[in-house]
Image: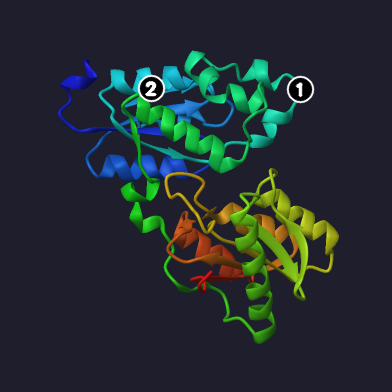
């Protein structure tokens, strides 16, 4: 069937690892869109999109020209990026060959990976991707524009209200995480007794939490995960789900504090049930003025 013969408007998903691109694709389909998914190799799982995506194609992480051509072939001029890209793999031996870019990708990323005149910060690289897609006629939009219900509202999400001591840890961790976000280093910190145990960098939130557990085997620490002060909602939006809680429970974490209205909460009912069953507290709050 010619995809353009389908009168539903087409939207695209650049799908990396995790539940988020699946949930967003489901929301798009439920809203009456024709969903075109481009799965990032070594990150997406093809079977997860059966019955959801009207079209699915594999692309390499830096095959931007191929991605644009595939989207345009299916009549897509609006798309979103969703899911985690395991950036640490870019520093493994042979990564440049494994993730060989096409010509468009090479032009976009040459200065960042070969010429070394550009940096490799998340905002820099993801912003470049958005720019290249725009040049190709594809507007990248926030995933939450298609699924606004994923943004967590302010308040106690699960568990017991915070004690004064725990709130003090949240406040301390919040200021630290906001500064790390301003520097585009990471989004999460783990603290106890107003001391930093672990700060997220390239490894991601789960490994940051695991490291905090190794350094604080007595447990009882607090995890704070916030948006960057300059957060672009089109990419790298803080996201939590049951897996985040599982990692905390295994490592000895007690409290998770997230930013209201700028954090995505996946599988909310399961999330709250798991937190309550395992004695974890989750709060969503808004930042004070920076």
Mark 2: secondary structure: helix
| Residue 7 point in image, percent of width and height | 15, 28
Quadrant assignment for the C terminus: bottom right
Q: Is residue 262 left or right of 30 when viewed as pictured? A: right
- The residue most toward the bottom is 164
| Residue 269 point in image, percent of width and height | 45, 62
| Residue 255 point in image, percent of width and height | 64, 70
- Quarter of the figure with residue 221: bottom right
Is residue 37 visible in the rendered image? The answer is no
Residue 68 — which label? 2
Q: Is residue 260 above or below residue 237?
A: below
Residue ID at (18%, 25%): 6
Mark 1: secondary structure: loop
Residue ID at (74%, 27%): 92
Residue ID at (22%, 40%): 32
Q: Is residue 223 above or below residue 33?
A: below
Residue 137 — which label? none
Residue 93 — which label? 1
Q: Earlier in the sequence, mark 2 or mark 1?
A: 2
Quadrant assignment for the N terminus: top left
């Amino acid at each position: 069937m010619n995809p353009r013969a389908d009168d539903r408007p087409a939207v695209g998903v650049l799908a990396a690892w995790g539940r988020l691109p699946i949930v967003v694709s489901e929301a798009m389909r439920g809203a009456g869109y024709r969903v075109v998914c481009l799965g990032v190799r070594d990150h997406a799982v093809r079977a997860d999109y059966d019955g959801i995506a009207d079209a699915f194609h594999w692309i390499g992480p830096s095959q931007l020209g191929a991605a644009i051509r595939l989207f345009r072939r299916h009549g897509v001029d609006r798309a979103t990026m969703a899911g985690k890209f395991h950036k640490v793999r870019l520093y493994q031996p042979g990564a440049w060959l494994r993730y060989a870019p096409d010509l468009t990708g090479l032009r976009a990323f040459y200065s960042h990976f070969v010429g070394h005149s550009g940096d490799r910060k998340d905002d820099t690289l993801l912003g470049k991707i958005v720019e290249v897609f725009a040049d190709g006629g594809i507007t990248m939009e926030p995933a939450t524009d298609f699924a606004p219900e994923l943004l967590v509202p302010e308040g106690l999400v699960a568990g017991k209200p915070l004690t004064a001591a725990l709130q003090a840890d949240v406040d301390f961790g919040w200021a630290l995480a906001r500064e790390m976000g301003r520097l585009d280093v990471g989004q999460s910190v783990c603290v106890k007794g107003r001391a930093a145990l672990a700060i997220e960098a390239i490894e991601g939130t789960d490994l940051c939490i695991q490291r905090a557990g190794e350094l604080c085997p007595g447990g009882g620490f607090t995890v704070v995960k916030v948006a960057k002060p300059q957060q672009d909602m089109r990419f790298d939006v803080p996201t939590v789900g049951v897996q985040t809680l599982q990692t905390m429970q295994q490592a000895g974490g007690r409290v998770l504090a997230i930013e209201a209205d700028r954090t995505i909460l996946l599988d909310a009912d399961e999330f709250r049930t798991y937190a309550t069953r395992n004695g974890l507290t989750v709060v969503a709050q808004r930042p004070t003025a920076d």
